[in-house]
Amino acid sequence: MDYLPIFLKLRDLPCLIVGGGEVAVRKLGLLLDAGAAVTVIAASAEAVIVELADRGLIRLRTKVFEATDSEGFRLIIAATDDRAVNAAVATAARRHGIPVNVVDCPDLCDFIFPAIIDRSPVLVAVSTGGASPVLARQLRTRIEACIPSRFGTLARLAADLRERVRQAIPEPRARRHFWERTLEGPAAELALQGRAEDAERVLLEAADAAARQERPAWGSVALVGAGPGDPDLLTLRALRLIQEADVIVYDRLVSAEILALARRDARRIYAGKERSRHSIPQDDINALLANLAAEGNRVVRLKGGDPFIFGRGGEEIETLMACGIPFQVVPGITAASGCAAYAGIPLTHRAHAHACVFVAGHLKDGTLQDLDWSQLVQPHQTVVVYMGLQGLPQICAELIRHGAPPSRPAALIQQGTTRDQKVLTATLETLPDKVADAGIKAPTLIIIGEVVGLRKKLAWYRSRQETEGRSGNG
Ligand code: SAH
């Protein structure tokens, strides 16, 4: 180890920054976050520094640095753009035995700044010992992604209730088990949602139950949107909940790559829906979720896209609400957003479309659902049809019959955002035949409107087929 990582308490302690430029401003921010009493010495200082001084939050001395200026400080940072001045600051600091950091000059530093992940009171510091600041920042980005943004709330909750839990569960081993379970359980989940009061109540109930050596009702359900296919499009919360789940109840549209993110010992239950072959009837799914949670499981109900867009999410939580089971809904990227982005077709555009409508185009007993065709044929909007592959010929025919120009651009996107994405572009008149000839596989999404023409300029994503050199479509 070239450096010892430590966390320094600087609250109200006198610290000095020499220099008044951008670098000084950044370091100043860090010292102020740590509550230090900062003095800045600079011949000239950025406006933010002057303003902080005017507000009395720091002390600013507008002067050239002299060796005697360093006396009495606990920490010094040299952040001027003049190497000679920086070296003089380092020499003076060392003479007084004060730890010094010289920006961009590791040889003169007594200490270095790590890349910081701040979930106060939880702090993670990353350092490469000066080897590569960029690498440190990249590592920080990865760590940022796996620590929920409200992790600090959880830590504060644990701190606040530590004593009460100690009294409730005096035996140390039982108490450790309690914390291990609790910090990954429903109380923690509530804290991470920012519901600190609910979290406290649930945690104390659990502590009481543990004291009585009962098993509390741990169960909960998260209705999670898995996005359109590409696992990178999961939200951070979706990823965390998938990794923590005891049981995952998933749909056909959820990709194998996403399921693979679950714990190895998590139960996986397939709930359908194949077109015209609903694997589990909706009522049974609703009941299944409630029962699994009542048994004490952390259940993730994983759905393609967004659970509240053609996903029956509303029906599923209605049952949970009626049963008093704790739940949350985690939005996902809906197929329209995912497919549009990966196909290079903006859903709105100042010149072409000022509105965007999502409709369900599935057939029931061979006929289309009632749709408001006169509204759907209006110009300057984009119509996105979910579940429209079987009904495509009827949909195009109805739009034309209700006055849409047969030449209106239309696209069909197969397995959008995945490596097997395929995009066919045509017009309302020609799309059905083009699709019939192309050997298309579900799921597919249809986008209708002028914006489809933008794909010529904006297509950026390359599917497996395209990268392997065969010609793309559309
Ligand atoms: N809740 C989902 C939609 C469920 S309905 C969402 O928000 O995306 C199922 C329909 O979604 C499919 O018939 C298809 O029209 C569309 N769909 C979902 N994923 C898709 C994908 N990767 N590519 C194209 N269409 C998709």
Image (cartoon, rainbow, N blue to C red):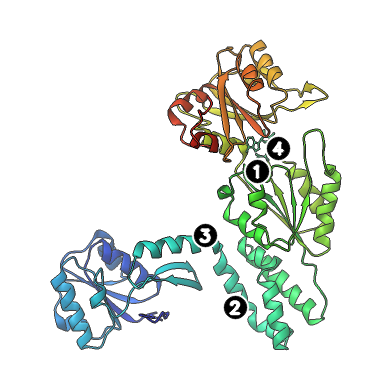
Tell me the residue that label 4 is attached to: 310
Q: Is mark 4 within 8 Å of ligand 1?
A: yes
What percent of the width, then of the height, locates residue 78? Answer: 23, 73
Crowdedness near tag 1: few (<14), some (14–19) or many (≥20) residues, C-alpha within 10 Å = many
Q: Is residue 408 above or below residue 234?
A: above
Against 428, residue 141 (above or below) is: below
Amino acid type at mark 3: Ala
Specify whether 426 is left or right of 243: left
Decide which of tag 2 and tag 3 comes sooner along the chain.
3
Residue type highlighted by circle 1: Asp
Label 4: state its secondary structure.
loop
Image coordinates for residue 268, horizontal then vertical, percent? 76, 55
> Residue 157, position in %: x, y?
61, 73
Distance from label 3 to label 1 (Cα)?
Answer: 21 Å
Viewed as shown, does residue 19 lie left or right of 406? left
Q: Residue at x 36, y 61 (%)?
A: 134
Query: From mark 2 to mark 3, how far is it between C-alphas?
Result: 24 Å
Q: Residues within 10 Å of mark 2 (few under 14, many from 20)?
A: few
- Residue at the spot 77% in from the left edge and 25% down from the top edge: 363
